[in-house]
């Protein structure tokens, strides 16, 4: 609805607002070490090691056919990195063993990748009205995607395998992880 410059400014403003919310929250301020670790997660996920870096790699790869490790590197950035951070940030306020935190991180990283693979699949499966963005734009921009590299069925299988690995890691947390199990199913099967 608005021009590209306005969209970029809105994104910049929302990103800054996320940091402001975390930094100004009084409940978080009562636990400064956790608050600082949460801010660090968000900074990594939003910056060159996460969303911005993944998006830069994605744009640089336009017109190229990437192998699966290259494609995975891009996809673990972008929105995948933000999903990972959104799962890991609250863990900084909880009491988890090192093993539980590592398992949660495996889940968070893998489910972020599943989100991105599913996003690639939706580009070829859904229409513009359902997606809220131009269907087929990845193909039009000659982007390497999982369906392009592995085929649609291969991409579906990779998403399911990655989701299964994520769920296996999460099971170490027991019933406390039920909400995240639901989230993993939603991400794998979402239609928009």
Image (tube, grey):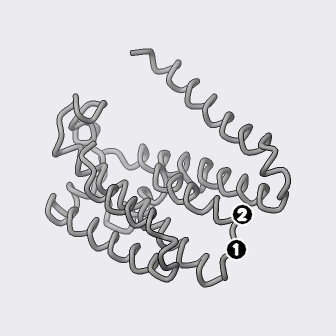
Mark 1 lies on a secondary structure that is loop
Residue 134 is left or right of residue 182, and the answer is: left
The part of the image, by quadrant, that contains residue 133 is top left
Residue 183 lies, in percent from the top left, at 40, 59
Residue drawn at (52%, 18%) of the image: 6
**Rendered position, 106 above or below 52:** below
Q: Residue furthest front?
A: 175
Residue drawn at (32%, 75%) of the image: 164
Q: Which residue is mark 1?
A: 95
- Mark 2–mark 1 distance (CA, rounded to whole Å): 7 Å
Residue 92 lies, in percent from the top left, at 70, 65
Residue drawn at (34%, 56%) of the image: 187
Q: Which residue is mark 2?
A: 93
Mark 2 lies on a secondary structure that is loop
Residue drawn at (17%, 34%) of the image: 127
- Between residues 133 and 136, which one lies in front from this camera angle? 133
């Amino acid at each position: 609805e608005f021009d590209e410059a306005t969209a970029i400014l809105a994104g910049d403003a929302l990103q800054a607002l996320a940091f402001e919310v975390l930094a100004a929250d009084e409940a978080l301020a009562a636990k400064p070490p956790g608050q600082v670790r949460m801010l660090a997660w968000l900074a990594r996920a939003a910056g060159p090691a996460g969303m911005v870096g993944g998006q830069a790699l994605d744009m640089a790869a336009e017109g190229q056919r990437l192998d699966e490790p290259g494609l995975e590197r891009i996809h673990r950035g972008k929105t995948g990195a933000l999903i990972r951070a959104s799962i890991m940030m609250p863990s900084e306020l909880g009491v988890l063993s090192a093993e539980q935190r590592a398992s949660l991180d495996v889940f968070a990283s893998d489910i972020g990748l599943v989100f991105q693979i599913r996003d690639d699949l939706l580009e070829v499966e859904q229409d513009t009205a359902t997606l809220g963005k131009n269907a087929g734009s990845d193909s039009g921009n000659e982007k390497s995607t999982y369906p392009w590299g592995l085929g649609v069925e291969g991409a579906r299988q990779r998403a399911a395998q990655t989701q299964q690995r994520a769920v296996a890691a999460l099971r170490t947390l027991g019933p406390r992880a039920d909400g995240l199990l639901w989230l993993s199913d939603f991400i794998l099967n979402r239609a928009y």
